[in-house]
Amino acid sequence: MVMAADSKFHVLAVDDSLIDRKLIERLLKTSSYQVTTVDSGSKALEFLGLIQEHQHTNFKSPSNSSFSSSNNHHQEVEVNLIITDYCMPGMTGFDLLKKVKESTSLRNIPVVIMSSENVPSRISRCLEEGAEEFFLKPVRLCDVNKLKPHMMKTRLKEDQNQEEEEETRTEIELESVEEQQQEELEFEMKSKKRKGGMDGEGVEAERRRRRRFDNNGVATVI
């Protein structure tokens, strides 16, 4: 595995051919992407955290130490796009595509397929399964230039989802505060009423003097 550092987007490139891996790696780095390369679909799944294996001797980290599979390692670098060869021994690029799209946590990652064979039925099948693009080898720089819009679209969706989650969390917190204040007020009113310290009108007057929260969470006194 080869990794580059300090880039906005991170691409996982999968190809069993060393020559093709070097080519796609060079093209991606030319476009200022961070690149991780692996030589099989199973190693891609391991890097993504979908499968666990004890150790791969040909997995190398930036320090050239043996790669050790762990979920913590996988989460260190976010993968923004996967580009994979179609024809590989064991797990094909199509199989890898299906695994990614079946994963709840990874299905939003854009996947691009590469192949040296122009087979229309193969291309259609990959696109129908969720691939964003299908490139014919040798991959060119103009092909790589098509990747960024897919990553930007995914990043925008992630930002929107995060904003919606934060808004929902804020609303829940406000509702919880209001409910707690209401419970405290009711308890206090009942206690005073039992002691004979307040009649019905007094309870209502006290209620109106209590602090309230409007829809924006701003405290007001009525």
Image (cartoon, grey):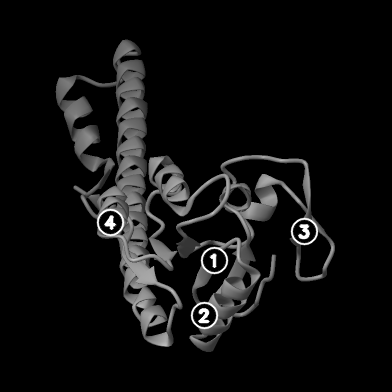
Residue annotated with mark 2: 28
Total marks in image? 4
Q: Compare marks 4 and 2 and give the one earlier in the sequence.
A: 2
Residue annotated with mark 3: 58
Q: Which secondary structure, mark 4?
A: helix
Question: Residue 128, position in %: x, y?
Answer: 25, 51
- Whether tag 4 and tag 2 are in contact, CB under 8 A, the answer is no
Q: Compare marks 1 and 2 and give the one earlier in the sequence.
A: 1
Q: Is residue 40 left or right of residue 28?
A: right
The span from disc 4 to disc 2 (Cα, nearest Å) is: 22 Å
Residue annotated with mark 1: 13
The span from disc 1 to disc 2 (Cα, nearest Å) is: 9 Å
Depth check, front residue: 161 or 178: 161
Q: Is residue 170 left or right of residue 16?
A: left
The span from disc 3 to disc 2 (Cα, nearest Å) is: 22 Å
Q: Compare marks 4 and 1 and give the one earlier in the sequence.
A: 1
Q: Quadrant of residue 115?
A: bottom left
Q: Which secondary structure, mark 3?
A: strand
Q: Residues within 10 Å of mark 2 (few under 14, many from 20)?
A: many
Question: Residue 68, position in %: x, y?
Answer: 77, 50
Depth check, front residue: 146 or 188: 146
- Whether tag 3 and tag 2 are in contact, CB under 8 A, the answer is no
The span from disc 4 to disc 1 (Cα, nearest Å) is: 18 Å
Q: What amino acid is at disc 1? A: Ala
Residue annotated with mark 4: 127
Q: What amino acid is at disc 4? A: Leu
> Does the rendering let one see residue 89?
yes
